[in-house]
Amino acid sequence: AIGLAVAVRAGRTARTLVPLACAATAALPYLFTIEYAAPRFLQPAYALLAIPVADALWHLVRTPAGRWRPWPAALVAVALAGHLAVQLTVLVHTVDRNTDSRRDWARTAATLHRLGVRPPCLLT
């Protein structure tokens, strides 16, 4: 909403409204027709929403004359750093879980191989 308000004030409503409308039309079917949560379905909407959000953040940290606003710039920087820290934590957790899972499957395959099971085989 802030990104749209900034765009309207700057006279670039259409260039901001198009990504917002596309994001809404991409997200609405997944939000209301799929019964389970799958964030990958919303990634196109997130990418489209990044455009007006970036515009709004840029407007918050700069004055109309082009100078930096120290406090808002610091708050935006801290928020972005916090977001990156959360994303890194999720990434590390996911990689660790996948590594453990791969190790378990390798151990299972080695045991089956010792017992004489040979490809092609399917484990379920």
Image (cartoon, rainbow, N blue to C red):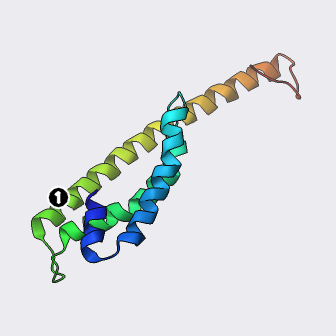
Label 1 secondary element: helix
In-image side of 100 versus 24 (left or right): right
Outermost residue, left direction? 71
Q: Nearer the viewer, residue 15 or 105?
A: 15
Q: Nearer the viewer, residue 37 or 76?
A: 37
Q: Is residue 7 above or below residue 108?
A: below
In-image side of 99 versus 64 (left or right): right
Please rate how many residues cluster around mark 1, counting C-alpha atoms within 10 Å: few if below 14, some from 14 to 19, many from 20: few
Q: Is residue 57 above or below residue 94?
A: below
Q: Which residue does the numbered mark 1 point to in the structure image?
A: 75
In-image side of 75 versus 37 (left or right): left
Residue located at (35% from left, 63% from top): 52
In which quadrant of the rendered view does residue 105 lie? top right
**Residue 107 picture location, percent across and down:** 68, 25
Q: Can residue 7 be spotted in the picture?
A: yes
State which quarter of the image contains the N terminus: bottom left
In-image side of 14 versus 8 (left or right): right
Residue located at (38% from left, 47% from top): 87
**Residue 34 picture location, percent across and down:** 55, 32
**Residue 3 picture location, percent across and down:** 30, 63
**Residue 45 picture location, percent across and down:** 48, 52
In which quadrant of the rendered view does residue 33 lie? top right
Residue located at (59% from left, 29% from top): 101
Q: Amino acid at mark 1?
A: Leu
Q: Can residue 95 be spotted in the picture?
A: no
Q: Is residue 108 above or below residue 14?
A: above
Q: Is residue 70 above or below residue 104?
A: below
